Image (cartoon, rainbow, N blue to C red):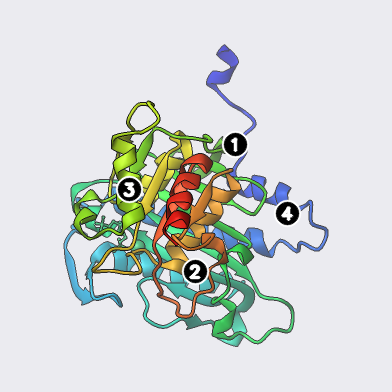
Amino acid sequence: HAAEAHRTDLMTITRFVLNEQSKHPESRGDFTILLSHIVLGCKFVCSAVNKAGLAKLFGLAGETNVQGEEQKKLDVLSNEVFVKALISSGRTCILVSEEDEEAIFVEPSKRGRYCVVFDPLDGSSNIDCGVSIGTIFGIYHMKDGHESTLDYVLQPGKNMLAAGYCMYGSSCTLVLSTGTGVNGFTLDPSLGEFILTHPDIKIPKKGTIYSVNEGNAKNWDGPTAQYVERCKFPKDGSSPKSLRYIGSMVADVHRTLLYGGIFLYPADKRSPNGKLRVLYEVFPMSFLMEQAGGQAFTGKQRALELVPKKIHERSPIFLGSYDDVEEIKALYAAEE
Ligand code: AHM
Ligand code: MG
């Protein structure tokens, strides 16, 4: 249709969220304001990532983050931008960032009622070679009159109010759920606005792709090893699955959400809790998967039911298409 060439009724992310929030009579616009500050952070990081080579932002900042990994300049910058944007929204009370060892408690004059957990720039090993990286975030809402203490962010992921990620790839895509499905928005650079491009994302019930770092196979436990073996040599006469692994959680999860399949970061003998962090990696992605009709499993339980004890805790994770996750659940159940 020729008329489609110039769309004139643009559904921006702000308009979309305002529409959604207007269904809740108690809504005072606070969530929309918070989100617009997150969106600002994403736009900043997107432009910094695109300019990384030019601006000489590559390389090490000479600091180490909480997990003892090398921290790149872009990580430091992205973290600063998000922390400042979130505090200045006036809507946050506790912030947990992958880059900060301690949680940040917002000073009373700027305090609001949302707790935001985030990884400002995930997949940093991919920065220097131009592979997709992303920001991941989850949002909890603090009840009226509640003290702002750490227990508020040590809640199971199912209590999150919203979760999302922004992928800095060939285009900049923000995927969001406020608990009523999943929607994807793409940044139109000429407008500087995220426009709804992927309404109501549903993950295929069964996929044909598995995504895992197979270099760790030597140290896997039985069920993970059996599962991956079945992906390659199916017992039921079906075709083997394809392997895709980018090594950037946001990009691997984004593909899984759109094409279906399973993403695994299992436990292994060297890291019995896997690698990925519960609060700002496992929970937001599990929330999105469930909202899109998929599942997320830790090897022991539904991922969103996990109760974290520490803010930087890790957990194994298996997430993706409903049927594919069922299969790995069955293998773990058989082992007990
Ligand atoms: P990071 O937070 O240090 O960037 O690490 C997280 C990343 C994820 O994006 C990705 O899924 C995983 O690490 C890849 O790990 P590995 O290189 O062990 O396969
Ligand atoms: Mg990370």
Distance between the alpha carbons at the discs numbered 3 and 2: 34 Å
Nearer mark to the viewer, of 4 and 1? 1
Quadrant of residue 78 within the rendered picture: bottom left
Dots 4, 1 in contact, CB < 8 A: no
Whichever of callouts 3 and 4 sits on the residue coming sooner in the sequence is: 4
Examine the rendered structure and indicate whether residue 147 appears above or below residue 2: below
Q: Which residue is mark 4?
A: 21
Q: Residue at the location (43% across, 51% down)?
A: 331
**Real-space Cα separation, disc 3 to disc 4, in angstroms:** 45 Å
Give the secondary structure at mark 3: helix
Q: Position of residue 334 (x, y in %)?
A: 45, 54
CA distance for labels 3 and 1 = 36 Å
Instruction: Kindly identify which residue carries mark 2.
Output: 117
> Which amino acid, mark 2?
Val
Q: In this view of the protein, which residue sits in the foreground, 171 or 232?
A: 232
Q: Which mark is residue 199?
A: 1
Q: Is residue 41 visible?
A: no
Residue on which the image places disc 3: 226
Which element carries disc 2, helix, strand or loop?
A: strand
Q: Earlier in the sequence, mark 4 or mark 1?
A: 4
Indicate which disc, 1 or 2, sits on the residue closer to the N terminus.
Answer: 2
Answer with mark 3 or mark 1, whichever residue precedes in sequence: 1
Alpha-carbon neighbours of circle 4 within 10 Å: few (<14), some, or many (≥20)?
some
Classify 10 Å Cα crowding around label 3: few (below 14), some (14-19), many (20 and above).
few
How crowded pointer 2 is (Cα within 10 Å; few <14, some 14-19, many 20+) is rated as many
Q: Amino acid at mark 3?
A: Gln
